[in-house]
Image (cartoon, rainbow, N blue to C red):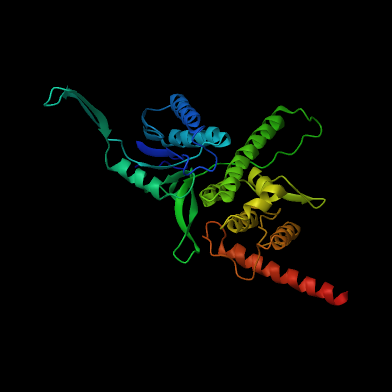
């Protein structure tokens, strides 16, 4: 494997396995609409594959897809584009990616049985890389993709981010299984061009932002439907929302007239939209999303002196509003739930605890004066 300077130049190829969530796993699909969704899923898979600028091998088996792609950037594009097209149409899947080859061996036989009847046998067997991605996908309790292999973000893997999916342990408590996901960049909401409201760039950015909002809303809606069902599969969607938070740009988020501005799409869906916010917090483990939002903003948003919310005071009005929201929704507590540091760093949780103390002191002072 060769990793280029600042880019992901990898002498692959790359192997991928993905499996569409069916009637048992999906919060949306019924036995009646599953065939049409499966047909649409295969259409998206093949159309995106034909658009790639690389060599590709693809094998379709019912609702499963095996691929070999010789360019990592194109493999990532395939993954992102497939999610972008499928998820808003309530077609969800999970998959895994690693470096390797299909190593396909075909089996084909046309003959006759001993009694003279015709017999036809056909199929394929695959190599060890396919076995790896198959089991990685099976163990993955989420939607989207899971990367397994030696490439790391700090080594030039620009498309990779750290994430984790929740599982319920034997004591009915949440444990987190950490993994590497593919980043899904989400730009902040563009500011209106007051001098030229029809400015092309701004209009295009706004359209892209609205598409991102619709994309995330589709995921959250599926999670809420699942939460209302008896299948209890809503946690499948939590890790993907965490990956979107990690991939989002919070560097411009601000407050004007006590209203949030310049925030990415995931913040609008999870924080600004009250309907989704009330519902999503009913999912076990979903409080981690709001601690993650707080942590990302604390580290990404910086003042004119390049100081983050944690290290400076000039942006305290932003952190105050964040903590007030966490308090009102009872997310901020004296003891925080156990979550991975890739979601909420120890520094951000310590900062939150400090702000909590300040809030409590102010509350007590206000109470004594009144």
Q: Position of residue 54 (x, y in %)?
A: 40, 28
Q: How many marks?
A: 0
Which residue is outermost to the right? Answer: 370
Q: Position of residue 135 (x, y in %)?
A: 35, 47
Residue 199 in view? yes
Looking at this view, is 300 or 356 the one in front? 356
Looking at this view, is 29 or 70 the one in front? 29
Horizontal arrangement in the rendering, residue 8 relative to residue 249 (left or right): left
Classify residue 290 by image quadrant.
bottom right
Q: Position of residue 244 (x, y in %)?
A: 57, 46
Q: Give the residue displayed 88% in from the left and 74% down from the top.
A: 370
Classify residue 9 by image quadrant.
top left
Q: Give the residue displayed 27% in from the left and 37% down from the top.
A: 126
Give the answer, above or below, for where 271 lies relative to 58. below
Which residue is outermost to the front? Answer: 115
Residue 253 in view? no
Horizontal arrangement in the rendering, residue 19 relative to residue 213 (left or right): left
Q: Give the residue displayed 80% in from the left and 53% down from the top.
A: 258
Horizontal arrangement in the rendering, residue 281 relative to residue 74 (left or right): right
Query: Which quarter of the figure is the N terminus placed in?
Result: top left
Which residue is outermost to the bottom? Answer: 368
């Amino acid at each position: 494997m060769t990793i280029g300077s600042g880019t992901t130049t990898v002498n692959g190829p790359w192997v991928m396995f993905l499996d569409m969530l069916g009637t048992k796993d999906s919060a949306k699909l019924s036995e009646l609409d599953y065939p049409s969704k499966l047909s649409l899923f295969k259409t998206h898979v093949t159309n995106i594959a034909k658009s790639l600028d690389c060599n590709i091998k693809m094998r379709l088996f019912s609702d499963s897809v095996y691929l070999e792609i010789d360019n990592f950037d194109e493999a990532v594009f395939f993954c992102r584009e497939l999610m972008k097209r499928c998820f808003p149409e309530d077609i969800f899947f999970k998959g895994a990616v690693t470096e390797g080859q299909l190593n396909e061996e075909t089996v084909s036989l046309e003959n006759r049985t001993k009694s003279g009847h015709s017999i036809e046998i056909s199929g394929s067997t695959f190599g060890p890389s396919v076995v790896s991605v198959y089991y990685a996908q099976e163990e993955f309790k989420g939607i989207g993709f899971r990367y397994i292999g030696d490439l790391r973000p700090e080594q030039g893997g620009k498309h990779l981010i750290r994430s984790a999916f929740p599982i319920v342990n034997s004591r009915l408590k949440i444990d987190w299984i950490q993994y590497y996901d593919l980043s899904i960049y989400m730009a902040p909401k563009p500011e209106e061009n007051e001098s030229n409201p029809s400015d092309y760039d701004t209009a295009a950015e706004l359209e892209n932002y609205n598409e991102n909002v619709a994309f995330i809303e589709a995921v959250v809606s599926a999670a809420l439907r699942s939460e209302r069902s008896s299948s209890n599969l809503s946690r499948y969607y939590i890790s993907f929302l965490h990956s979107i938070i990690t991939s989002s740009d919070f560097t411009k988020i601000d407050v004007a007239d006590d209203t949030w501005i310049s925030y990415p799409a995931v913040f609008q869906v999870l924080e600004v939209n009250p309907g989704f916010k009330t519902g999503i917090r009913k999912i076990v483990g979903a409080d981690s999303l709001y601690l993650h939002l707080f942590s990302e903003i604390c580290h990404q948003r910086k003042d004119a002196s390049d100081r983050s919310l944690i290290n400076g005071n000039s942006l305290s009005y932003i952190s105050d509003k964040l903590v007030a929201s966490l308090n009102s929704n009872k997310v901020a507590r004296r003891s925080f739930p156990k979550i991975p540091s890739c979601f909420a760093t120890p520094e951000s949780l310590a900062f939150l605890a400090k702000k909590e103390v300040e809030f409590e002191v102010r509350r007590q002072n206000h109470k004594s004066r009144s």
